Amino acid sequence: MTSDWIDSESKYYMHVVNRQPVVIEKGNGARVWDVAGKEYLDFTAGWAVTNLGHNHPEVTSAIQEQAQTLLQTSNQFYTLPQLRLAEALVENSVLDKVFFSNSGAEANEGAAKLARKYGKIHLDGANEIITTLGSFHGRTIGMIAATGNPHYQENWGPLSPDFVNVEYNNLDEIKNATTDRTCAIMVEVIQGEGGVIIPSEGYLKGLREWCDEKKILLIFDDVQCGAGRLGTLWGYETAGVEPDVMTLAKGLGNGVPIGAFMCKEWCDVLEPGDHGSTFGGNPLATAAANATVRYMIEQDIPSAALSIGRYLRSKLEDLAQSYSEIVTEVRGVGLLLALVFQEQISAKLVAECNQLGLLLNPVRPNAIRLMPPLIVSESDCDEAVGIIETALKKVLGN
Ligand SMILES: *Cc1c(COP(=O)(O)O)cnc(C)c1O
């Protein structure tokens, strides 16, 4: 019974999140089923993670095969899946080198270490990293200082020093904050957790030019925007600007935990002993990610995401037009979309949608985020928008 499981959670598990009352047992493609057998269309995709859909056969068989072969060595030795994945990422991006971690936060920690060492060697010891308000870079002690959001910072001070948070989408603020202590700027191409915030034309290009001028590193946190989510394999392709350092996680392993940070050859300042991780890049995780990335490239999943994203967006725009008294905006790129409301109805709306068989994220009190697997069909999108409309009517009381 669902309620028994929920009771067991409150007895045994730390209450760090208010969950939706849905106990998910299994998934397939764009759908999941709860313990009572009820089916849901999953427009959260494990938080922009299962980009190829739940239980993708290629990824599942790579995991099965690797589980029968080798799960773990240590970073004292070479392993084949790690090398295959490294090759796939480097050969299919503008970055030259990669290191594997276990999560997005850890990938960003690694990128920050690389930037600080770069500053130490090439910028006279500069160690400040500028990040933006409304960003999300993870929950480690280091990354809460990078994440420009008081909610993630307030109980855990003193914050790790030398992360400077400035307004997003404001080039002047970045310029004013840049000093001879600055070694890097880290931003998301689109702020995901911040509410699907798209910077204006020219912002990311402006950052690129500024970093070139100041000879500091431009880091793109592509943890959410990467792995096809925006309709391009990596976020920088959508941005039209190349970063010096890029971090990945979420969709990289289609559900198997893995992160990565990548850099250009010229800023690869790390040397033996500088960085490491017991599990980072282990054979199981890298075999899954290798299958994910190669399938994504071979089948051109990003292009499919772009076109189905346009379809979903047009349906949402129709909905917005019909309910213009409450829906104020549809925003996003590819399959990272948000529907924005006049009022703070997203929690209620998402609860109604759950009941009606659609999983969504109330990313802001007045906005819901849609981040389905990149393999959703037009009829899945029709169904989802239909459910949102029904839920909206209920919330509005008509
Ligand atoms: C989710 C996310 C992270 C953190 O990833 P974890 O794997 O939860 O540590 C970092 N940056 C961005 C942009 C994210 O969306």
Image: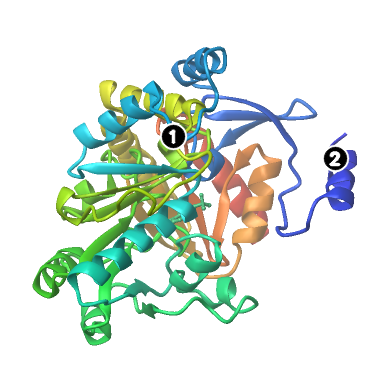
> Where does residue 155 sit, x and y in percent of width and height?
65, 77
Q: Is residue 293 visible?
A: no
Q: Which mark is residue 293?
A: none
84, above or below 47, in the image: above
The image quadrant of residue 215 is bottom left
Question: What amino acid is labelled 1 in the image?
Answer: Gln
Mark 2, residue position: 5
Real-space Cα distance between discs 1 and 2?
42 Å
Q: Does the residue tagged 2 have its C-beta within 8 Å of any atom of ligand 1?
A: no
Mark 1, residue position: 76
Q: Residue at x 20, y 64 (%)?
A: 204
For the residue labelled by badge 1, is the local secondary structure a helix, a strand or a loop?
loop
Viewer-nearest of discs 1 and 2: 1
Question: What amino acid is labelled 2 in the image?
Answer: Trp
104, above or below 213, in the image: above
Q: Residue at x 64, y 59 (%)?
A: 347
